[in-house]
């Protein structure tokens, strides 16, 4: 994961940049760097592989004295965690730090090389420096050069820029990854979160999606994605908020929903090498994918639904038979286990009692055990033979959101690795799937844009007594998850069904009072789901269709509302379609006035049976 800091200060900033980066260490990183403008406007960098102490040692030997600078902790995505790939990336005219993924970096790189720009690293990030440099070379001012570059970038990211031509300026931009402005006394700051800015100020402005900002010693000018100057509220952050920061959001759940483009980017960075378009797992695994006879997935609640989605991937990509069960059933039914089996436990907290007991059962029976866990210090993480961490960061809202999508992404990567190892996926298929995964942060950011429409729809859903969710294939678990999210935080009774099961019973419930949320990306079962929607419509049911642009164009059924997601490869749709169902549950609960972050009767970590 990456962390960003920028300071336009009145005293040398290098030490402050490093102090601030230390507060971002929790995100994980494998190299770090700072750049400052030295006297005479000379842009100077210090970068180091590994921990911040290496960067500090470098700075002790070769100090920087500039009053304006940017800093970065890097979690390698494109290119190894070497010094030359570490940020800041610089040309003679600009230095940049970047968090996130630039999806169209190849296309831009080719274009810029053809235009005479000379690259010195393998990273997607350098393309941003070269693009801004190109615009500066054409005579644009630093701010206009950034604004022009932003219009060309695809993906989800946060950025900070430093310009030798102006020692009273740092420019920042956010799309998909958070960035906050800190207000000091004759000094201004930029940081990935309020925590990074805590040593300097408690006066914070959170940038909104698509914003970019120019900070100078005298203040900040914020622009939205159309480049119009906008006002964003200034928040005084309380001391406790520096521990777990709710940002500008009313609830942790809202913040965590919105963090998904970023945390999915971080999680992908751990498991894929986007430049090589390959899955990247630890070099040695305690088991051999090719020799497995069966995969047993065990989890509870939302984590179980993530496992159920993964079943579709493991079967499709790797032709690996998958057994899946909820932990509370698995542990007591004493299931026979395959000799050459792997058991995979999925848990946000890593402390869920039933999941832990199931893990111990499998270990005792000699099965290989692996865990997909968000809390790295948890018991499940410690006891499993191997841990595949989700890098969702602390999840505070009781209703799981970002941990769920991170679980999905980790298991999608595992399924692709299994498919490759079992000879079921070719190299070209791996490349295609990895490229699709790389698009997720950007797609999630686009999915979040449906929020105003979903908020309006939530007012209608709030009036319902029951709600049905339908989906087919890998959208079926998303239907189950949608129903769970809604019932746990709004207390409206809701059920998820496989769309094909409708006729086998649930259709008896349909009348004009019943909202039916249909999750239907345009995949190979889309037509079948449309038939099911027709059956619902014929009985007066009120359909909420969540589909893609193509699906919306072809849907021939009257709906209460159609929520349109971007078109995307069907394999990654479950990750993106999780977002609208989370937002629908959230806004329904907010409208009903429930305790969204701590719904009645529920605990974040279920350590009892
Ligand atoms: C629902 C939810 C729960 C958890 C379940 C398992 O939003 O959060 O259903 O998914 O209690 O918890 P973990 O993942 O911590 O094992």
Image: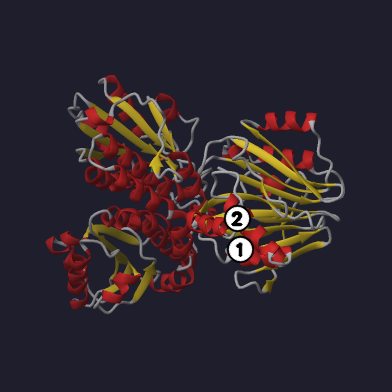
Which residue is found at the position 13% from the left and 64% from the top? Answer: 503
Which secondary structure lies at badge 2?
A: helix
Which residue is found at the position 25% from the left and 47% from the top? Answer: 312
Whether residue 401 sits left or right of residue 93 in the image: it is left
In the rendered view, would you say 386 is above or below 533? above
Q: Quadrant of the C terminus?
A: top left
- The image position of residue 31, as x and y in percent, is 61, 36
Q: Residues within 10 Å of mark 1 (few under 14, many from 20)?
A: some
Q: Label 2 belongs to which residue?
A: 128
Q: How is the image coloured?
A: secondary structure
Residue 149: which numbered mark, if any? Answer: 1
Work out whether residue 36 can be spotted.
yes
Ligand 1 found in image quarter: top left
The image quadrant that residue 232 belongs to is: bottom right
Mark 2 to mark 1 CA distance (whole Å): 7 Å
- The image position of residue 162, as x and y in percent, is 73, 53
Nearer-N-terminus badge (2/1): 2
- The image position of residue 92, as x and y in percent, is 72, 51
Whether residue 133 sits left or right of residue 408 in the image: it is right
Whether residue 206 sits left or right of residue 525 in the image: it is right
Q: Are marks 2 and 1 in contact (CB under 8 Å)?
A: yes
- Of the pair 40 and 562, the residue shown nearer to us: 40
Which residue is found at the position 22% from the left and 39% from the top? Answer: 322
Q: Residues within 10 Å of mark 2 (few under 14, many from 20)?
A: many
Residue 331: which numbered mark, if any? Answer: none
């Amino acid at each position: 994961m990456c962390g960003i800091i920028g300071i336009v200060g009145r005293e040398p900033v290098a030490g402050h940049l490093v102090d601030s980066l230390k507060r971002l260490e929790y995100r994980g990183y494998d190299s770090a760097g700072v750049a400052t403008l030295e006297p005479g406007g000379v842009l100077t960098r210090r970068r180091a592989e590994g921990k911040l102490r290496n960067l500090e040692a470098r700075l002790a030997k070769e100090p920087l004295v500039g009053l304006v600078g940017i800093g970065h902790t890097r979690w390698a995505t494109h290119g190894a965690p070497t010094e030359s790939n570490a940020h800041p990336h610089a040309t003679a005219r600009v230095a940049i730090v970047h968090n996130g993924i630039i999806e169209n970096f190849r296309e831009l790189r080719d274009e810029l090389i053809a235009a005479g720009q000379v690259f010195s690293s393998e990273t997607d990030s350098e393309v941003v420096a070269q693009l801004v440099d190109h615009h500066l070379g054409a005579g644009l001012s630093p701010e206009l050069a950034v604004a022009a570059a932003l219009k060309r970038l695809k993906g989800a990211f946060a950025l900070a820029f430093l310009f030798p031509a102006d020692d009273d300026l740092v420019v920042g931009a956010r799309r998909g990854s958070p960035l906050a402005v800190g207000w000091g006394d004759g000094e201004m700051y930029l940081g990935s979160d309020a925590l990074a800015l805590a040593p300097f100020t408690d006066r914070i402005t959170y940038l909104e999606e698509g914003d970019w900002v120019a900070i100078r010693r005298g203040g900040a000018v914020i622009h939205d994605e159309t480049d119009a100057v906008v006002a964003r509220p200034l928040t005084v952050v309380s001391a406790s908020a520096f521990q777990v920061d709710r940002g500008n959001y009313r609830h942790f759940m809202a913040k965590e929903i919105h963090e998904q483009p970023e945390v999915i980017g971080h999680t992908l960075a751990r498991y894929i090498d986007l430049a090589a378009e390959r899955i990247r797992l630890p070099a040695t695994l305690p088991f051999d994918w090719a020799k497995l006879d069966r995969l047993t997935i065990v989890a509870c609640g939302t984590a179980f639904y993530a496992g159920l989605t993964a079943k579709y991937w493991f079967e499709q990509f790797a032709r690996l038979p998958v057994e899946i069960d909820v932990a509370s059933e698995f542990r007591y039914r004493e299931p026979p286990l395959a000799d050459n089996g792997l058991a995979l436990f999925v848990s946000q907290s890593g402390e869920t009692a039933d999941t832990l007991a199931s893990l111990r059962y499998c270990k005792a029976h000699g099965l290989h055990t692996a865990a997909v866990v968000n809390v790295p210090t948890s018991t499940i993480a410690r006891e499993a033979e191997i841990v595949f961490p989700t890098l969702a960061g602390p999840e505070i809202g009781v209703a799981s959101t970002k941990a769920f999508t991170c679980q999905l992404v980790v298991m999608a990567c595992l399924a692709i690795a299994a498919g490759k190892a079992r000879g079921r996926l070719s190299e070209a298929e791996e490349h295609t799937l990895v490229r699709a995964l790389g698009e997720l942060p950007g797609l999630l950011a686009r999915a979040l844009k449906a929020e105003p429409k979903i908020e309006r729809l939530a007012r209608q859903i709030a009036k319902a007594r029951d709600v049905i969710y339908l989906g087919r294939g890998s959208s079926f678990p998303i239907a189950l998850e949608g129903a769970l999210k809604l019932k746990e935080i709004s207390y409206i009774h809701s059920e998820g069904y496989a769309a094909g099961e409708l006729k086998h019973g649930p259709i008896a419930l349909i009348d004009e009072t019943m909202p039916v949320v249909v999750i239907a990306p345009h995949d190979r079962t889309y037509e079948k789901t449309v038939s099911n929607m027709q059956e619902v419509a014929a009985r007066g049911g009120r359909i909420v269709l969540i589909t893609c642009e193509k699906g919306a164009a072809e849907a021939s059924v009257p709906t209460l509302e159609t929520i349109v997601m971007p078109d995307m490869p069907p394999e990654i749709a479950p990750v993106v379609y999780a977002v609208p169902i989370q937002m629908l549950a959230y806004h329904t609960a907010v409208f009903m006035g429930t305790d969204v972050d701590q719904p009645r009767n529920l605990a974040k970590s279920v350590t009892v049976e």
